[in-house]
Image: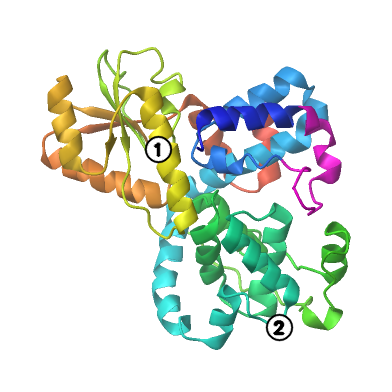
Amino acid sequence: MSSRAEALAQLRDFIPRVPRYAKTRNYVRPGYEEVSRLSRWIRYRVISEEECVQSVLDSHPAEAAEKFLQELLWRVYWKGWLELRPSVWDSYRKDLISLSSTHKDSDSYQHAINGDTQLSFFNEWVSELVTTGYMHNHTRMWFSSVWIFTLNLPWQLGARFMYHHLLDGDPASNTLSWRWVAGLHTPGKIYVARPDNIATYSDARWTPKPAELRVDPAPPRPETLLPLVELPPLSSETPPEASLIILHDDDLSADLSGEFAGRGAHYCVFAPSLVESSRQKIALMSELRGDTAQRVRGPLVSSAEEVSVLARKVGCDRAHTMMPRVGFERDSVTRLSSELRASRIPVVYHRRAWDERLMPHARSGFFKFWERIKSSL
């Protein structure tokens, strides 16, 4: 069963391999020993980025671990970047509505999602993604580039397809990585999958012919983004003893954070139906939610009515939760909050000190973000 204990064991197992990560991380080899594969746990904060950073720095000097630390912080960067630009998420969701109707029956789209193209290597990537729910980060870059520039399909549909199947599918990391490949994140800079790069980093497992890939696409027309917003302001209220805490999929270890830890709280785990998720992802989330509920000794709840009943039972007139990041979880928790407000149970939102400290710096490119925050790690 997938659990926090399993996540911590996997983290401990990878720590000795951190110093060689920088040299080997781009190789896509069976077994994926070169990478940590911690992403499915970090995505749902079964373990947090902060825990991972601390574990690494407890065992290695920062210089020896820098590349791995940067990869951990990319997730924080993506989340912060989207948090400051929520209109990008809104535009993506809006685009999907029109693109889905125009492409759902097209042969090129159907061949792509079914792994039935003329590109055998691409078909293998589709098969692995659908079968295992995992894809090496370098393969994700190749896949996205081929989808956009060779198959000439909208990046939004590719992002949705990948999110649907990835067990570590994250609205910010997934959506913004696709935008980066497409040349929208850094204007004028696109990522192009090249035959020699694929052959080199797959140890010649895949050897695309030059004619099979488009390697000279023009960058897209620059887009105009709305001005940055600030992080949503939160209440400064400290949860009282015996408060009701709602955990959700964006932070399944929030009870262990400094904001809630040590309080005599009553917990519940919000478990709404999952959107845009494969059966594998639904099964994983069922296990992770169940493990969390068992650990905090609280029930799984899926509706405002269930939370209201629990609140009355434990004598709480409000609930506390971590603010979900921009994406599907925020949408579902916002709906829950609205329904609870109608039942006169306000929801008080909190944010980890880690996020409060780091995410506001995600205002431009990653390496500017890194330079601003690395000394605080």
Quadrant of the rendering where the C terminus is positioned: top right
Question: 211 or 231, which is in the foreground?
Answer: 211
| Residue 261 falls in image quadrant | top left
Count residues near mark 1 (Cα–Cα under 10 Å), then give few for <14, some for 14-19, many for 20+: many
* Residue furthest to the front: 1
Q: Residue at x 88, y 67 (%)?
A: 196
Q: Amino acid at mark 2?
A: Gln
Q: Is residue 211 above or below residue 15?
A: below
* Stretch in magenta: 16-35
In the shown orientation, is residue 246 left or right of residue 130? left
Q: Residue at x 52, y 30 (%)?
A: 4
Image location of residue 242, percent across then percent down: 25, 15
Image location of residue 21, percent across then percent down: 80, 39
Question: 144 or 353, which is in the foreground?
Answer: 144
In the shown orientation, is residue 195 left or right of residue 243? right
Disc number for residue 289:
1
Count of number-bearing discs? 2
Disc number for residue 327:
none
Q: Is residue 218 visible?
A: yes
Q: Is residue 240 above or below residue 339?
A: above
| Residue 70 falls in image quadrant | top right
Q: Amino acid at mark 1?
A: Arg
Disc nearer the start of the sequence (1/2) = 2
Image location of residue 43, percent across then percent down: 53, 42
Verify whether residue 27 appears in magenta.
yes
Q: Identify the element where label 1 is drawn.
A: helix
Q: Residue at x 38, y 39 (%)?
A: 232
- Circle 2 residue: 118
Gap between marks 1 and 2, in whole Å? 40 Å
Question: 156 or 361, which is in the foreground?
Answer: 156
Q: Residue at x 80, y 51 (%)?
A: 26
Verify whether residue 263 appears in magenta.
no
